[in-house]
Amino acid sequence: MAHPLLIEGHELRLPCAKILQNMQSSPSRITIKDNHSMINTKRVLLLEDDEMFKTIIKEFLESNFYEVIAVNNGAEGVRAVLKQEFDVVICDMMMPKLPGDMFYTAIERMRPHLCRRFIFITGHRGNPKINDFIKQVRGTMLAKPFHMDDLLEAIAFVQVKTAIR
């Protein structure tokens, strides 16, 4: 007889006798977040000046086991990149102080290996300057508003693209 292990509402049947011997008569409960340290997380740098949008993206990614460092602009982004390494960089194109294209140029000089890890986000899809820049750097772009699943797909695409080279 398999004893259920409940993981945040999902039931997993474990028929292994040794596990069953160690379990009490009631199902054990663990939460995924409690075991977050056991998962190999990816570190994401998020540059977004809209506080609400930044919070939504950050919380969503953290709920999907990404470690997220969120900053308001490119100048703060440069400081973050100097302090640590990132697996993915999600960069808004229109920000105060240092916009996305200038931030990318700064990173290209400081940490060129990060350039393949960028996902650009913008609410200015029809802006020719932005479109030309994205084409020039062969960047991955999401137009706001976007579905969060599209963001996860873009992250997966960037990770595969990075792993290939």
Image (tube, grey):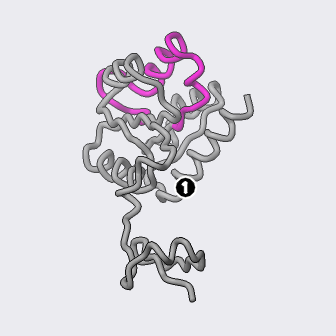
For the stretch drawn in magenta, the main secondary structure is helix
Kindly state the secondary structure of the residue where label 1 is placed.
helix
Decide whether residue 151 is among the magenta residues: no
- Rendered image quadrant of residue 16: bottom right
Q: Residue at x 44, y 21 (%)?
A: 103
Q: Eyeballing the image, is 35 above or below 79?
A: below
Please identify the quadrant where the N terminus is shown.
bottom right
Please identify the quadrant where the C terminus is shown.
top right
**Relative to 157, is 81 on the left or the right?**
left
Q: Position of residue 148 (x, y in %)?
A: 47, 57
- The stretch in magenta equals 92-119
Q: Eyeballing the image, is 105 above or below 12?
A: above
The one of 81 and 14 positioned closer to us in this rendering: 14
Q: Position of residue 22 (x, y in %)?
A: 45, 72
**Relative to 19, is 33 on the left or the right?**
left
Residue type marked 1: Asp
The one of 94 and 120 positioned closer to us in this rendering: 120
Residue that carries the numbered disc 1 in the rendered image:
150
The one of 44 and 103 positioned closer to us in this rendering: 44
